[in-house]
Structures are given as C-alpha cells and as structure tokens.
Amino acid sequence: MAVSFTVDGQVVRVEGLHPTTTLLRWLRESGRVGTKEGCAEGDCGACTVVVAHDGRWRAVNSCLIPLPSLHGRAVLTVEGLARGDRAHPVQEAMVEALGSQCGYCTPGFVMTLFEGAHRTDLDQPWKLDDQLCGNLCRCTGYRPIRDALQQVAGTCPDDGLAAPATDEDALREDGEGGAWFAPTRVSEATAWLAEHPEARVIAGATDLGLDITQKHARFASLLSVDRLAELRGIEVAAGMATIGAATTLVELEDWSAEGLPVLHRMLRFFGARQIKHRATIGGNLCNASPIGDLAPVVLALGGAMELVSASGARTVSADDFFVAYRRTALQPGELLARVRLPIPPAATKLGAYKVSRRRELDISAVSAAFQVRVAEDAVTEARLAYGGMAATPIRARAAEALLVGRPWTEETVRAAADSLRESFQPLTDHRASAEYRHRVARNLLLGFFAETREQPFIALPDRPTATVQEVG
C-alpha cells in the first residue's frame, strides 16, 4: 500500500504498510516521538494531533486513525509548531500558566490548545471545558491548563500555520496485506461492496479503531466512506432534517444547536472534540451498541434510515433498524446513506439524558430521549426511548400506552414510570447494576416531567439535567 500526505509541512510517501497501521504508530516508528501513546483507545488525548479539514485544523486522536485515511491530507504535530528557537504562542501559554509537570500529556494538550487558538467560537465557559475534555492530566491539574487555553482561545495567532487545502481524490489499494477503497462516489462504493460483501465499512474509525489497537485486528477489506461528499451535510425541508451518514458529530452538533436542540443536548456530553471530529452519525448508529447515545434520540424523534446498495435504495424506520445486540437491518452490500429526522412542532415536549460515572467523555450507563405532545390537556403522542436497558436501544411502549390519552400530570407520569420495571430486564455489569438502571430509567422520566410540566424544554448545552429526590 502506498499513501502520500503532509506532516508538519513535509510531503511524505509511505509504502508497504498494512492498511490498519495507525497514524500514531507510523509517527513514532518514523522518529516523530513528540506525539505520545497513552491509552490507545481515544480516551486520554496524549496522541492528539491536528488534521486539516474544510479549511480548519481539527484536533483528532492519532491512535485511532488508519494511515490510508490521510491520503492527500495534511497533519500537524507538536513538533511542527515552534519556529527555530521561538515557541508557538500556545506552548508559551502552557509555560506561563505552569501547565506542565511530567510532560507526558503536554504534547496532546498543546495540540488541543492549538485548535482552540484558531477557533472563533469559544465564547462561553462550557466551550472551554468541552475543548479540553478529551485530554487527561494526572499530575498538573486542570486549572493551569484551562488558564492557558483561556489565554489563547480565539486569538488566531499569525503563526504561518494556516490549514492547507487537501486532496480528496479516491484511493484504492488491493495489496497482499489487505484491500482499502476510499471512493468519491456512492455508486462506486456500493459496486465495490457488492464485490466485497465481507468488507468492513469505516468512517472515522473511532470504534473500528479499537479493534485495531486493542484486539490487533487486521481486516482483509476496508471500505472508507469519509470521502463521499454525497453522504455529508444536513438539509432541512418540509419539517424534515436529512443528515448524510458521513456527517461528523461536530458538524451535527454545530447545526443542532439551533436546528434541533434536543439532539444538541445529547451531543454536548457525547465525547471529546477529538472523537466528534472523526465520528459520524452513521457510524454511531450502525455500531448498534445498546448504550449508543444517538439511538435513543433518533428513536424518540421517529427517525428513519435510507439504505443504499448496488441494486437500489430502501427506507427502514428507526424502530425496525436495531434488530439484535449490535445487529442492524443492513443486509450484505448495503450502506447507510442518510438519516431522516422529523423536526417536532414548537410545542412538543422534548428531553435527552445521559447518565454516566463522569460527565465528560464517558460511556453511558443509561441514556434516554423523550418526545411527548399534549393537546387539550391530554397526551396525544409519546415516544420514550432508552439506551442501556436492553440488548438494543428500545422504546418503552407500555409506558407510552399509559401516557397517551391521559392528562400530562405527575400522577400519570408516575404510573408510566412505574411500568418500566416490567418492560425492561437490564444487565448488571461493571458500569451499573440492573437495579440502578431500573431506578435511573424511572427517575429520568420523572425528571423529564419536572422540566416540561409548564412548557417545552429548551435544551441549553450547559444546563444540568433535572434531578428528582425520590429514587424508590
């Protein structure tokens, strides 16, 4: 396999590597050891670099990116920031704020600060926290590092490091080590997938990358969809949002702040910037994890999936998309092309919740999303969706039935919440016990009622989720 890309302004050509070789591994094996390896699963941020995308530098986890994904693109590492003996402004800020002790995490933090320095939208305190939440520090403490970010955020320094234009040409390699195809047209992708039904589809690799780094998987065939412009972007028409499956979560988050606030609320605590710059809505849904955080929102909104193959297209409702543990309705040769989400009327009561051991960058124990419509003091429609309560993301249909046709009162909601225990049989695992999940699921519905008793909930990104004292 031959891959060409730019690293710190230098064009490099790499040959003879397996397509599952990660950027981090190549950087360190080529002598560029400023970028560190910590967890190798996208949790610690020690491996953070920035990649040029849409005219901007985007912070990403180099431990999860297969090298072929970077063909024709540009990478900047911590070793490319300084100019001669002069440190970059973000490096100077870290020194002035005393933001480094052992220094192991520092290169990753510096690259996160570099992206923050070139952002123009870090205008709220929660956004500073969000910018840093993908980097861990075990000895310095976060206050001085946050101070350094606050010093440089949005300054857009004249550092001569503007993000260059990138080459989005297709890449096809069929070597002995494995096949990699990154087409630029959906028709090419479906035709190739018909010939390679065993191929794994890869977008941002934030999940598949774990198979590579943790399980040492070496896939025979990989179809990359991150160059398919047809599968990117969001269109809103006639009360329906159509989202390309390869749309990244950062793009989705930016749009949903105004376009669909209930989705924005879930995305705020979905994961780190480094993850959301690579992860896609299609990848998250096709992963079909029972604790995937987007699925409950899609179920609650009554979404649908557009699937394409060499033989045509079909649409599957979100209710029918998740068929078993980590299994979807996708057939061999099919791709998820678009996700369609109805935009609820203004008076709709909406809520989204994620419960995890820590607020930032953690996997949920229970997640939930709710949509309730009330007319003339009675519930006319209810969609209550949960993650972490079954082998798939699932709706609480018995509770929905107890709400519809009844007044939106605490008595009605308590009856629906009590019915959840009979509807779900969650597992006990290292994240939570079954009893804990039962109580949290019940309390989330009660909290949703508390938030929406008087009016629809307006989801602000820094607003805490509702709490209710009763847990019995």
Image (cartoon, rainbow, N blue to C red):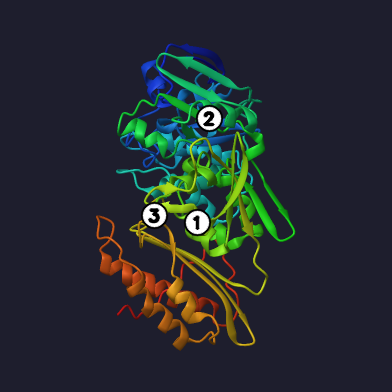
Q: Which element type, helix, strand or loop, lies under badge 3?
A: loop
**Label drawn at residue 290:** 3
User: How far apart, in angstroms, are the residues tagged by discs 2 and 1?
Assistant: 23 Å
Q: Amino acid at mark 1?
A: Asp
Residue 262, percent across and down? 56, 63
Considering only vertical position in the picture, is 407 above or below 452?
below
312 relative to 35 in the view: left or right: right
Q: Which residue is mark 1?
A: 320
Instruction: Report the residue at 52% width, 47% height from top.
Output: 150
Residue on which disc 2 sits: 193
Provide the secondary structure element on which disc 2 rests. Answer: helix
What amino acid type should be assigned to the residue bearing mark 2? Leu
Between circles 1 and 3, the one closer to the viewer is: 1
Q: Residues within 10 Å of mark 1 (few under 14, many from 20)?
A: few
Q: Under tag 1, what secondary structure? A: helix
The quadrant where residue 66 appears: top left
Q: Are the residues flagged by discs 3 and 2 in contact, CB closer than 8 Å?
A: no
